[in-house]
Each structure stands twice: as C-alpha cells, then as structure tokens.
Amino acid sequence: MLELLSGFINNTGFFLADYRNYLMIAVGILFVWLAVAKKYEPLLLVPIGFGIVVGNIPFFKGFGLGIYEQGSVFNYLYFGVTTGLYPSIIFMGLGAMTDFSALLARPKLMLLGAAAQMGVFFTLIGALALGFFPKEAASIAIIGGADGPTSIFLTAKLAPHLIGPIAIAAYSYMALIPVIQPPIMRLLTTKKERMIRMDEMRDVSKKELLIFPIAGTILCCMIAPTALPLLGMLFLGNFMKECGVVERLAQTARTAIVDTATIILGFTVGMSTQADVFLNAKSLGIFFLGSIAFSLATASGLIFAKIMNLFSKNKINPLIGAAGVSAVPGSAREVHLMGLHEDPQNFLLPYAMACNSSGVIGSAIAAGVLWSFMMI
C-alpha cells in the first residue's frame, strides 16, 4: 500500500515540477490577467495564457499527454500549427471581416503598409549578426510585421523548433501595442504633424470591391507564390464578403470558423512553451529581437509617411504610418486615439485601417519572399 502511495506521489505534478514550470505558469497567469484586467487583446491572450499554464503542468513521460508526444490529443491539435493550417483559416476569416474600401479610396496608403515591412528586413540582419541560423533569423524577423498567424506560418516552414517563443513574442507585442507604439509615435512626430487632417475619401464602387480580391490574389501571389496559403485565403474570405451571394459562408468564416481556429491556435501555441523546451538563451534573444523588429516596423511607417509629405501637396497625417504593421485593429485604434488626443475632431480611424489592411498583405508577402529565399 505504501509503495502504491509512493508511486502515486512520484507521478504528481507537484513532485515532478521544478522552478521553471512555476515560472512559466506565472507567465501564463500574467497573460490571462492582462487580457481580463487590462483588456489587452483578450481574444489572443486568454487562450495563449491558459495554454501556457496547461502546457507547464509536468507529467510522467510516456503517458501520451504532452504536446510533443506523438499520438497525444494535444499533438494532434498542434498539427494545425506545424502545418500552417490554423493561420490560413484565420486569414480567411480576417478577409471576411475586412473592408478594403478605405484602401481603395486612398491607394497610396498601401505604400505605408509596405514601408512598415522594413522592420522585418532590418531585424533579419540583426538576427544574423547575433549568430542565428538564416532560417531562424527569417522566422524571428517576421515578428516585425506584428502578425501572429504569419509569424507562426513562416516559422512552421523554416524553424519549427522556434514556434513557441516566436509565437509568444509576436502575440505579446501585438497585445502591448498600447504600451509600445504611442511613445514611438510621439517621438517621431511633432504636435503640428499629429494634428494634420486628412482629405475626404471618395466613394468606392461595388465593382472595385469585387475586382480587388481577385486582382490582389493574382498580383500578390505572382510576386510571392509562397504566400498563397495566406493571401489566397485572405482574398477568398474578402470576396465572399463582397460578392453578396454567399453571405452565410462569409458569416461563418468571420465568426465560427475563425473563432475556433483562434482558440485552438492560441491554446496549442501556449502549450508549446513547455519549460524544458522554452526557457533557454535563444528564447530571450527572440524576445529582444522581436521588440526591436516591432519598434523598427512602427518607426519605418512613420518616417516613410513624413517622406511622402515632402513630395505631396495633400499632406497625410504621419501617425497613420504606425498602422502599417498588420496588428489589426490594435495599431489603427492607437493611431486614432492619439489623433483624437491632439484634436478631438480629427478622425483618423478609416485611414489607419487602410494602412493596417495593407500591412496584413505586406507582411504575408514579406513572409513569402523570406520563405522563397531561404529554401533556395
């Protein structure tokens, strides 16, 4: 009887845990607290934070419980992460939610979404300089796009052993947009620039909205065919939204399907941060480089907006350049709030959303380009 009791105790999480497990469980609880108490991207941080807690409860190896154990329930769920399935589904739902009319009304704002991707390529150079292998460096660099699904998709293709830290870094910085972006926006713009009012947008026809997802698929995926799993699904979702004859499908894509994929993706990514796999020097380096990438992407969009104003009669508010990252709609909301702070009658949200949506496309193309180069 004592031997059975001893065996039971030896197999409990309390007996198997070490300080690293408790540290990661504390991180998971912090994520959940930020989501619930501070409302920082709760749709992301709740499943991720809970996944971190669950993934760091230690267990006796061989029971088929862990996310890295072949044949376990969690391993099957994790398959959608390692293959890029969940990011593609999320992109379809995102497309079904996105209104590209503001972007079509002011197409030059696409340049700001492209400019923000400079943070990706600057960080790639930095990661290589710090000794990361090229495929690892490319996976880290895409964090600068501030797009969690794209970061996971590219990392699954190039450096699957880094999915945990890269995904956590990407989603952490997306959640911390209200903390990270405003200081950079204030530093790189003057009060006068922040008070610039944008011209009225023209009306966009239904025909333009129907043509855009088809033309966007052809043009963008011809440039970067490896972006097809993301951009093909994004534009499919958008076409379903705009065509008006499959509203039931569009509604399902932007609600039930994307919500299910988001829950499972967030939870399994959180679980992948097992202490024995996650806590190492590389993870710390990824978090450092991720913050650099996100900051550089924000700064690149702001600076390019100021450069555009040097050659344009109709000035644009450079704040909207910060929304060139693809953290939808968090960065657009921060731009709008800062504009309102300077001038309560200055409504920048539609212009910022135009940059935001172009940033989604830009980050997917950047991921496709990096994947292509790294597989040569």
Image (tube, rainbow, N blue to C red):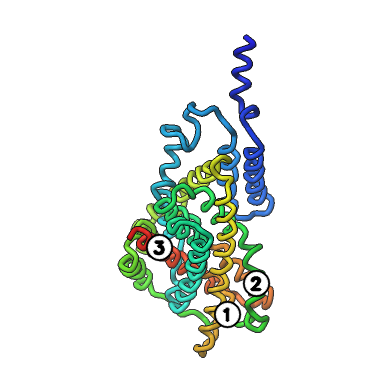
As rendered, which of 342 and 179 lies closer to the eye? 179
Q: Are marks 1 and 3 in contact (CB under 8 Å)?
A: no
Q: Which of marks 2 and 1 is nearer the N terminus?
A: 1
Q: To which quarter of the image does residue 370 belong?
A: bottom left
In this rendering, the label closer to the viewer, 1 or 3: 3
Q: To which quarter of the image does residue 93 belong?
A: bottom left
Instruction: Measure the C-alpha gap from mark 1 to mark 3.
Output: 31 Å
Local packing at callout 3 (Cα closer than 10 Å; few below 14, some 14-19, many 20+) is: many
Secondary structure category for the residue under label 3: helix
Q: Earlier in the sequence, mark 2 or mark 3?
A: 2
- Inspect the image, locate mark 1, and give the three-letter code of the amino acid beneath it: Asn
Q: Do the residues labelled 2 and 3 touch (CB within 8 Å)?
A: no
Q: Earlier in the sequence, mark 1 or mark 3?
A: 1
As rendered, which of 298 and 9 lies closer to the eye? 9
Secondary structure category for the residue under label 2: helix
150 vs 211: above or below: above
Local packing at callout 1 (Cα closer than 10 Å; few below 14, some 14-19, many 20+) is: many
Q: In which quarter of the image is the N terminus?
A: top right
- Inspect the image, locate mark 3, and give the three-letter code of the amino acid beneath it: Leu
Residue at horizontal 46 percent and vertical 76 percent from the top = 111
Secondary structure category for the residue under label 1: loop
The label on residue 84 is: none
Instruction: Measure the C-alpha gap from mark 2 to mark 3.
Output: 33 Å
Q: Mark 3 points at which residue?
A: 370
Q: Can residue 150 be seen in this view?
A: no
Q: Mark 2 points at which residue?
A: 338
Q: Name the residue under label 1.
A: 317
Q: In which quarter of the image is the C terminus?
A: bottom left
Left or right of 129 in this view: 5: right
Local packing at callout 2 (Cα closer than 10 Å; few below 14, some 14-19, many 20+) is: many
- Inspect the image, locate mark 2, and give the three-letter code of the amino acid beneath it: Met
